[in-house]
Image (cartoon, grey):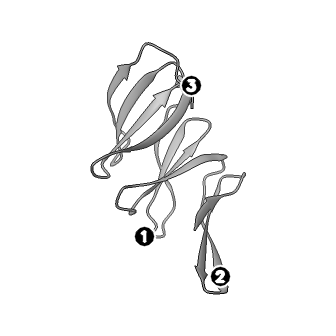
């Protein structure tokens, strides 16, 4: 079970029968608004209200890696662009849909919907 604390800490609870272990996986120092697993569950996107997206790979137990920072564009949400785990799609409040490479955070494409978006 993965969850985030208000302070921007990603926590993992390993639960087995009546026993559990707690592990702090990453501290990004920004409140995490959502956690999204990739379709094959190898990567986890950590999305903040400020528009920063981090990648965390549970199998590697490393630190979360900042992929992109869209803080200047009224960021609303992000998710994996399937199939695969190579791309991420984000949307701004103003209706701009953006595609990003998860390998290095490179901005690839955008589409303006011409309307405000709400979650």
Which residue is pictured at 43% across the width and 43% down the height?
A: 79
Query: The N terminus is located in which quarter?
Result: bottom right
**Residue at the (57%, 32%) spot, across then down:** 119
Between circles 1 and 3, the one closer to the viewer is 3
The percent coordinates of residue 101 (x first, y second) are: 33, 42
Residue bearing the label numbered 2: 20
Within 10 Å of the Cα at label 3, are there few (<14), some (14-19), or many (20+) other Cα atoms?
some
- Rendered position, 22 above or below 99: below
Q: Residue at x 35, y 21 (%)?
A: 111
In this rendering, the answer to whether 53 lies above or below 17 is above
- Percent x, y for residue 109? 31, 28
Residue at point 62% right, 60% down?
Answer: 3
- Dot 1, crowdedness within 10 Å: few (<14), some or many (≥20)? few
Instruction: Tell which circle, 1 or 3, labels the residue nearer the N-terminal end.
Output: 1
Callout 2: few (<14), some (14-19), or many (20+) C-alpha neighbours within 10 Å?
Answer: few
Which residue is denoted by mark 3 in the rendering?
74
C-alpha span from label 1 to label 2: 21 Å
Element under disc 1:
loop
* Image position, residue 95 (x, y; %): 47, 20
Secondary structure found at label 2: strand
Residue at numbered disc 1: 60
Q: Position of residue 52 (x, y in %)?
A: 54, 40
Q: Earlier in the sequence, mark 3 or mark 2?
A: 2
What SS does tag 3 mark?
A: loop
Between the C-alphas of marks 3 and 2, the distance is 39 Å
Of labels 3 and 2, the one closer to you: 2
32 in relation to 57, above or below: above
């Amino acid at each position: 079970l993965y969850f985030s604390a208000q302070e921007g800490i990603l926590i993992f609870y390993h639960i087995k029968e009546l026993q559990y272990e707690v592990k702090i996986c990453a501290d990004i120092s920004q409140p995490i608004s959502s956690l999204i697993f990739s379709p094959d569950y190898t990567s986890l996107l950590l999305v903040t209200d400020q528009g920063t997206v981090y990648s965390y790979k549970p199998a590697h137990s490393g630190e979360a890696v900042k992929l992109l920072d869209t803080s200047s564009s009224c960021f609303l949400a992000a998710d994996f662009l399937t199939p695969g785990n190579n791309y991420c799609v984000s949307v701004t409040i103003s209706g701009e849909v953006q595609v990003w490479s998860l390998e290095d955070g490179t901005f690839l494409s955008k589409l303006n919907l011409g309307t405000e978006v709400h979650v």
